[in-house]
Amino acid sequence: MPLIWLRVAVVCYGVGLLYSLLLLSKRGNLLGRIVEPAVGLGLIFHFVSLVESTVLVGHLSLASIHYSESILAFLAMVVFFVFFVGYRTVSPGIVIFPIVFVLTFASAIGQKPVTLTSPLLRNGWIFVHVVLIFTGYAGLFLSFGASLLYLAQERALKSKRQTPLLTWLPPLQTIDDIGYHALLFGFPFMTFGIVTGAVLAIEKYGPMFFYDPKVLLSFIMWAVYMLLLYTRWSSGWRGRRAAFLATFAFVVAICAWAANNFSRVHRFIAS
Amino acid sequence: MNLVLIGVNHRTAPVEVREQFAIPEARLPEAVKTLASCEGIEEGMILSTCNRVEILARTADAVPALDGFFRQFYGIDPAPYKKYLYEFRERDAVRHVFRVASSLDSMVVGEPQVLGQVKEAYAIARAVGAVNSQLDALLTRAFAVAKRVRNETAVATSAVSVASVAVDLAKKIFGNLEGKSVYLVGAGKMCELAARHLLAHGAKQIYVANRTWERATVLAKKFNGQAVAFEQLYETVPQADIVISSTGAPHAIFRKEHGERFLARRRNRPMFFIDIAVPRDVDPEMNRLDGIFVYDIDDLQQVVSSHVADRRAEADRAEAIVHMEVEKFQARLQTLDVVPTIVSLQEHLETVRQAEIDRVRGRLGTLSPEQELAVEALTRGIINKIMHTPITTLKSAARESSEVTTVIDLVRKLFGLRELRSSAAKDEPQAVAGGRRGAAN
């Protein structure tokens, strides 16, 4: 049953994906009217699916990789909606929707989910750790999206041509605010996520946990995150330079996400 | 009337070319004087705005002598610039003057500033004595046409001014203009207008820097702003989010290295430079800096032109008015053109009559007063009959624009009238001026 709800959510997010693709292919704002209700509906189905699968398992847990992908997508959408309410613009969706779609899609087609059997995952703290980190990721995604939009808007304004994109995008300042506030929003989550993870790992593995690729990458990502905030705060880096940094942080985040296979600490599949 | 108009405008020439021809306000009287003193030029005036430079002249003969002015005033040969220059003669020149004054030729069709600029240019030309009878009539009529267009069409009411385009762009950069500060460099009219728009949309602080301190303070007072000494320009500009520059400086006053310093001072917060000066005040290179956006007058036009389409219909109606007015004006002009010929024809025949009466008087002997009157009436009757057809032909030719000069020439040749331009020129202006004023009202 949860899988069906999830698939419905995927269809809804598909509207969001299509919306982004149409905008990027310069076809314009074709789905502008239905995109908000569609992804909103998707978020509701997604939530239902998550609740049901939790009920099914009987407790809060990360039963499979697909399940965690689903949670990440869900959190990214939640953060997106928080900012949507604050700034009344769907524009960051142009980056967020595809990411969310891919994550949800991957978790929805999963025929044979890789089940994470490690008893560790029964620990509620692990769940908290993952949710915190994921919320941090979501903030980073949003900020990354905003920095790309900032670049696009800056280009459009400098080229002095009235492109459809220019008219569609919110003002530069708004995009900038979204990017910055998404960073500010995500940073505490990321920090506490890493702290809880570190505490849990020390408990289990001792200080050696640090020499783990995934852990290292996570720390690098945290450092880049910090750097983003610092350059922004100290010298007001925006535009190109900020976009490069944000892209770098995004790539590191993807690597950290993908590094599960090499991580001893995060190997939750019983071997 | 040999009317010629040569000019460049925002459509024919990029700002780089226009800035070469632009004449600062302070030098305009001198330029007009130079123009009027050029050989073969009887009257002249010059309009120089950020969008156009136009030289209007009435020449002594049909060959325009404006090349001389280019060489004398600008010190350049106009030949290489021919592709940017447009040239109108006679009727076309009249039409162009009417269109410019009615703001139909403007970058923003219907914007009200241009009429004021034409009036100013006219006042300057008048002050230095470069215009008298004929251009005077033309310009007076142009102002009347502009008024008609403004009153009878909606062209002016829906005008999107450069200023409001600037506001739109500022909003695209800053979102909300609430609390943003604006820096005016130069205290020109356009600056003032743009500032007014920005204030109306929430901008808060206004700074004004101008080379003459008094004008800066006057303008600053108007907006409750702050006047800044021009020497402190570079230190104070970084405080502003939006800079509107319209000085008459011959070179850029904001260059890339200034921009870098501004950004450092502002911690990279974006800045928007609106450069409405020609020659430009802001080096276009500045636009390459991250966080600095520079729009010059041509860039603004690009944005504006997208709004123009809406007003096409109204503009068409305005064009129709202009067309009608040009016809009316031409007809009057030509009627006035035939007047001297009619007068000299009458004078000529009267002399002939007198001479003939004097010649035969001896042979007639003494005449009674009644006979005297009869002879008078007879001879007058004859010449009136003879004159009737040529005069009606002349008058109707005046209405048929194309053949008027041919008919005038023909009548002059047939009756052996003296050459108009050389000898009649002296007494013509008064007659024409009187008639023209009547025509204009």
Image (cartoon, coloured by chain):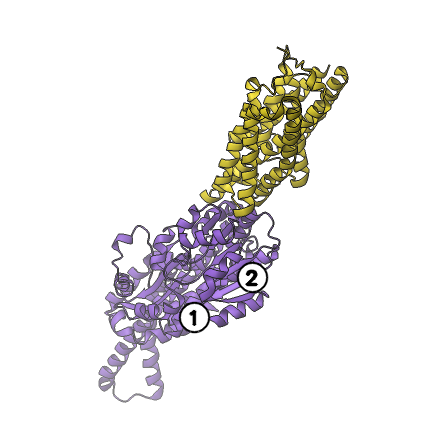
Give the residue at mark 2.
B206
Q: In the image, residue A97 lies at what x, y percent?
A: 60, 28
Q: Quadrant of residue A223?
A: top right
Q: Chain of mark 1?
A: B
Question: Which amino acid type is shown beneath numbered disc 1?
Answer: Ala
Q: In the image, residue B192 lies at what x, y percent?
A: 52, 62
Residue B236 appears in the rendering: yes
Q: Nearer the viewer, residue A193 or B388?
A: A193
Regarding mark 2 in the picture, which secondary structure is present there? strand
- The tint chain A carries is yellow
Q: In the image, residue A75 lies at what x, y percent?
A: 66, 28
Density class for disc 2 (Cα within 10 Å; few <14, some 14-19, many ≥20) is: many
- The chain coloured purple is B
Density class for disc 1 (Cα within 10 Å; few <14, some 14-19, many ≥20) is: some
Answer left or right for B288 relative to A28.
left
Q: Earlier in the sequence, mark 2 or mark 1?
A: 1
Q: In the picture shown, does residue A29 fall above or below B55?
A: above
Q: Nearer the viewer, residue A16 or B119?
A: A16
Q: Chain of mark 2?
A: B
Cα–Cα span, label 2 and label 1: 32 Å
Mark nearest the camera among 2 and 1 is 2
Q: Residue at x 22, y 82 (%)?
A: B359
Regarding mark 1 in the picture, which secondary structure is present there? helix
Residue B145 appears in the rendering: no
Q: In the picture shown, does residue B350 fall above or below A119?
A: below
Q: Which mark is residue B123?
A: 1
Name the quarter where the N terminus of chain B is drawn: bottom left
Q: Residue at x 33, y 54 (%)?
A: B85
Q: Nearer the viewer, residue A51 or B356?
A: A51
